[in-house]
Image: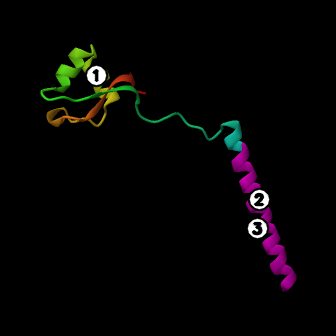
Amino acid sequence: MAARTSFFFLRMALVLSLLVTVTMASRSVGILKGKAAGPQCDTVYGVKTGDTCFFVTEAFNLTESFFLGINPNINCISIFVGQWICIAGSPN
């Protein structure tokens, strides 16, 4: 009985070490590396009193679709003073 138990634990240790080895190897090769999800923001702008989404797009010569692409969670109805919004980057 003791021999079967020790053999079981030996097999489990081998399986776990194999799993760790494969995981570490795949990370170093880059198999598990994915593309960054979401937009990439390169430059931000702090909203000032009187600013609107329209004002920001006009001031920085941005199209509406690009602006919304790099600011996917923005609510243009209620932007607020001090809010950081992205004005340059890539929407991905």
The x and y percentages for residue 92 are 43, 27
Q: What kind of residue is marked 3?
A: Met
Residue placed farthest to the left in the image?
Answer: 50
Q: Which residues are magenta?
A: 1-25
For label 3, the residue is 12
In this view, the residue in front, 50 or 39, is 50
Rendered position, 15 above or below 48: below
Q: What is the chief secondary structure element of the magenta stretch? A: helix
Residue placed farthest to the right in the image?
Answer: 3
For label 1, the residue is 65
Rendered position, 14 above or below 47: below
Kindly identify the residue that appears in the image at 40 percent across and 31 percent down.
39
Q: Earlier in the sequence, mark 1 or mark 3?
A: 3
Kindly identify the residue that appears in the image at 29 percent across and 24 percent down.
67
- Which circle marks residue 17 in the picture? 2
| Label 1 crowd (10 A; few <14 / some 14-19 / many >=20) | few
Quarter placement of the N terminus: bottom right
| Label 2 crowd (10 A; few <14 / some 14-19 / many >=20) | few
The x and y percentages for residue 3 are 87, 81
